[in-house]
Amino acid sequence: MKRIFTCVLSLLAVLAITGAATADDKADVLAAMEQWQQKLGEACAAGPDKIVALYSGDGVLWGTISPKIRSGAEPITDYFVSACQKLPKLKVEFKDPLVRVYGGDTAINSGSYTFIYEKDGEMKSLPARYSFTLIKQDGRWLIVDHHSSKMPE
């Protein structure tokens, strides 16, 4: 009994120090991902500013169709401008996101998604895998690191 009591106290201490993640935190991260999904679709029509605003000022993007890593708003903007040119009518569908929240202000979302775009008058798909790392700043989840790569065959 004493051992169980000690384990429970230890667990409570760890949770108090790190801040326990809640179901609301995960829901908020998923909502941020839905916003990214929506803004990606809008980026090709209205410009990338709104999707770039979802990244922190020092955010990093290793995009699916780029051989180089991008850091900061201007290089990330450049990536989305290029992506929209290469993949017209770009949209994305997330599949099976795996969200973990640490300390209440850091989250990682890993999974797969499929990009849908138009080529030669036909809709094509590009399956990919991703990892997003987000931090909560002023109550808002921002992307600090985003890696995406084509799904291996």
Image: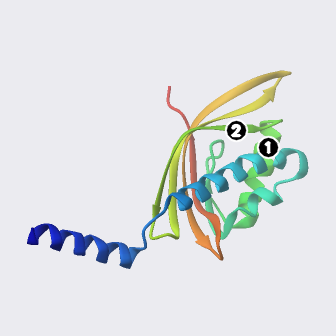
- Residue situated in front as seen by the camera: 47 or 8: 8
Q: Contact, CB < 8 Å: mark 2 with mark 1?
A: yes
Q: Earlier in the sequence, mark 2 or mark 1?
A: 1
Query: What is the crowding at mark 2: few (fewer than 14 residues within 10 Å), some, or many (at least 20)?
Result: some
- Above or below, 148 relative to 93: below
- Specify the quadrant of the image occupied by residue 137: bottom right
Write the residue at 73% across / 66% down: 73
| Location of mark 1 (residue) | 41
Disc 2 residue type (three-letter):
Val
| Snapshot quadrant of residue 71 | bottom right
Q: Of helix, strand and loop, which one carries label 1? A: helix
User: Which residue corresponds to mark 2?
Assistant: 92
Q: x and y percent of residue 105 in the render?
A: 52, 70
Asked if one can make out residue 69 in the rendered structure from this viewpoint, the answer is: no
| Left or right: where 56 falls relative to 151 | right
Residue for point 52% across, 52% down: 109
Residue 24: which quarter of the image? Answer: bottom right
The residue sitting at the left extreme is 2
Q: Where is residue 100 in the image (x, y as percent from the top left)?
A: 46, 56
Q: Residue at x 78, y 51 (%)?
A: 39
Mark 2 falls on what kind of element? strand
Apparent side of residue 98 relative to residue 58 in the rendered image (left or right): left
